[in-house]
Amino acid sequence: MILNNGYDTKAGNQYRKDATFTSTPEELTLMLYNGIIKFIMQAQAAVENNDIKKAHDSIIRAEDIISELRSTLDMNYEISKNLLLLYDYMHRRLIEANIKKDMDILEEVLGLAKDLRDIWVQAVKIVKKQYKAREA
């Protein structure tokens, strides 16, 4: 468990940094989806607690992750074009949620992020299984 003091925060940050550098692209994408989910849930809790700054900051972090996902799309694939539209929609909805501090919009985008994450997990499992079958 990482405690909120200088030493432990540095250790936690180093762990996350190391994980980022040693992860596969598939694992990094999963981390990004999990980050969106985490920050939207933090925003929801902040809205419930009327902590407007925390809600704003958390929503901005989720928006930033979506922007990162958008920037990594390879537009040579049809799925990337569809994901771009979905990411754009999620980003616009988060902007609206941030302006209004709207829990329904946050819940909507959270659901989309969870669906994307779950689909990604299944896709990675399928690819790994196919890769192992080709090696055998």
Image (cartoon, grey):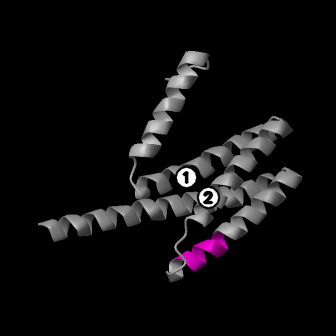
Q: Quadrant of residue 136?
A: bottom left
Relative image position of residue 127 (x, y in whole percent): 32, 67
Residue 135 falls left or right of residue 53: left
Residue 101 falls left or right of residue 111: right
Asked if marks 2 and 1 touch (Cβ < 8 Å), the reply is yes
**Image position of 23 with respect to 133: above or below:** above
Residue most extreme to the left: 136
Binning the other alpha carbons within 10 Å of mark 1 as few (below 14), some (14 to 19) or many (20 upward) gives: some
Q: Which residues make up the magenta segment?
A: 80-86
What amino acid is labelled 1 in the image?
A: Leu
Relative image position of residue 28 (x, y in whole percent): 47, 52
Q: Nearer the viewer, mark 2 or mark 1?
A: 2
Q: Looking at the image, can residue 114 be seen?
A: yes
Q: Label 2: which residue?
A: 68
Closest to the observer, 67 or 95: 67
Residue sitting at x 50%, y 24%: 11
Residue sitting at x 46%, y 32%: 15
Relative image position of residue 3 (x, y in whole percent): 56, 19
Q: Is residue 19 magenta?
A: no
Residue most extreme to the front: 21
**Which circle marks residue 32 in the picture?**
1
What amino acid is labelled 2 in the image?
A: Glu
Residue most extreme to the right: 100
